[in-house]
Image (cartoon, helix red, strand yellow):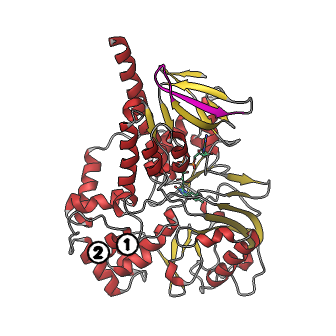
Amino acid sequence: MKKMREATVLVTEARERVGGNVTSRSDGTYTWEEGPNSYQPGDAILTLACDAGMRDDILLADPASNRYVLWDGKLRILPHSIESAVLGDFLTWPGKIRAGLGAIGIRPPAPGKEESVKEFVSRNLGTEAFERLIEPFCSGVYAGDPAALSSVAATGRVQRLEPLGGSLVAGAIMAQKEAAQNKKPRDPRLPEVKGQTVGSFRGGLKTFPEGLAKQLGDDVVKCNWKLVGVSKSAEGGYECAYDTPEGPQTVRTKCLLLTAPAYVAAEMVKDMAPAAATALNKFYYPPVASVTISYKKDSFRLDGTSALPEGGLTGFGQLHPRSQGIRTLGTIYSSSLFKDDKRQPDDEFMILNYIGGARDVAIKDLSEEELVKQVHEDALKTILKPGTPLPKVVGVKVWEKAIPQFNLGHLDVLAEAENALTAADCGEKDGLFLGGNYTAGVALGRCVEFGIEQADEVVAYLNAASKKAVAV
Ligand SMILES: Cc1cc2nc3c(=O)[nH]c(=O)nc-3n(C[C@H](O)[C@H](O)[C@H](O)COP(=O)(O)OP(=O)(O)OC[C@H]3O[C@@H](n4cnc5c(N)ncnc54)[C@H](O)[C@@H]3O)c2cc1C
């Protein structure tokens, strides 16, 4: 183990590699993502990447690229700005007027009610904006059901705008003012982030966790170390039992940050705090499959009958609202997203399809062949020329428990788990912290940001604990 500041830190991972869901694969010809495809390039993740010497590996997609949403058989360009929202064909005129009026506040929420994402957005922006814009994004981010997702838990920052300003627009103006007032000088090492772009790393997302692990070193980061039990130590702190390649190991620690999925954390705390385990087991992780396939470039419809620009395969990708008869949740144009990082042969165009989620759990029973056939048939309906033969299959991965759903009651259940840990003297005040995406938010960038915040909390805990020890 290695000394870091005043603490000794050990990072353990059950698998043979770091990164968790972040799973970039390469076979020498293709490079593809099996888990997350990209991240929102907030300052937290960019700073960490720069700190770990990965500044030159950061990739940012062209913010001018289009995103598409399928509606009535046409891939429509997602508006980039208020102007394009008003002038474009993404919403009908009644839909635009309803969204505009709603955004300035026409229907206040029912007091004390926890709204679903569907309720919150339909009340504020109208049914059409919900169906065409937000419903596909719930599929894209959570693979979730917007009627079940909690607005406050799943869209915290947007949800906050309404109480802040009395309407979404007034709240957004106030939030912008707040941000301008609190603006700190930006670290000059960070790349400029323009518009609604997304990020990755040269060689795929895995470059990032691998770079962090390399910086920490093998003494700190232990792969193939599976945590199998946690108990309170008679000498204070916790005893963590691991299965390791060298056989069982026990580590005593003053402070433990559990970032494994909620159902694993539940197993770890069940003897110390059974009620916390019951709460943690309530979080739902539906299955999602990622299916990466590649076609010859001339397989695509570039004649104006798809939304792809004539003669060019560009853009972030496309989302499919559940009402539009396409089973695939969304398709990412892997070949055009990070053009500087060659990820497939020059004469091909590779796409990453996500399929499944909370409203299509049956995908876990499909074979790889059936999954490929399904996404191919869906692509034929939107972007491929009729008669295009089955693609080159680059990689298929079924995540049986993919993404925790921030459903109605999520924050209460999280509080229930934390309160039960506190009541059993094994919560944050006793040095045991819960982390990971079901606590932070599911976006990769948010998980990183939250991890940095938690690291400060852990240091504060250890500093306070060592002061107490001196006072005793
Ligand atoms: C298919 C898919 C697509 C996604 N797409 C995107 C996207 O494009 N953009 C985005 O921002 N987010 C995306 N996400 C979400 C994002 O990837 C995750 O929320 C985030 O990576 C989760 O990080 P985590 O560390 O909380 O959990 P995980 O990545 O699940 O890591 C948990 C780790 O705990 C380890 N572990 C489990 N049990 C034990 C044990 N007993 N002992 C030791 N270690 C253990 C696991 O092996 C794993 O490495 C996607 C997720 C999935 C599944």
Q: Residue 123 carries which label?
A: 2
Q: Can you see residue 406? A: yes
Q: Earlier in the sequence, mark 2 or mark 1?
A: 1
Res 44 → quadrant: top left
The Cα–Cα distance between marks 2 and 1, rounded to whole angstroms, is: 8 Å
> Would you place residue 286 above or below residue 412 in this image?
below
Drawn side of residue 121 relative to residue 44, left or right: left
SS class, disc 2: helix
Q: Is residue 92 above or below residue 223?
A: below
Image coordinates for residue 204, horizontal then vertical, percent = 65, 51
For the point 56% across and 41% down, the residue is 55
Q: In which quarter of the image is residue 129?
A: bottom left
- Name the one closer to the observer, 259 or 341: 259
Residue drawn at (28%, 82%) of the image? 97
Segment tinted magenta in the rendering:
232-244
Task: Assess disc 1: are there few (<14), some (14-19) or many (≥20) residues with their C-alpha within 10 Å of its C-alpha.
Answer: many
The amino acid at mark 2 is Arg
Which quarter of the image is occupied by the C terminus? top left
Secondary element at tag 1: helix
Q: Are marks 2 and 1 in contact (CB under 8 Å)?
A: no
Position of the N terminus, as image quadrant, is: top right
Q: Is residue 438 above or below residue 224?
A: below
Where residue 296 appears, as percent x and y from the top left, is 76, 73
Q: For mark 1, what is the residue?
A: 118
Amino acid of disc 1? Lys
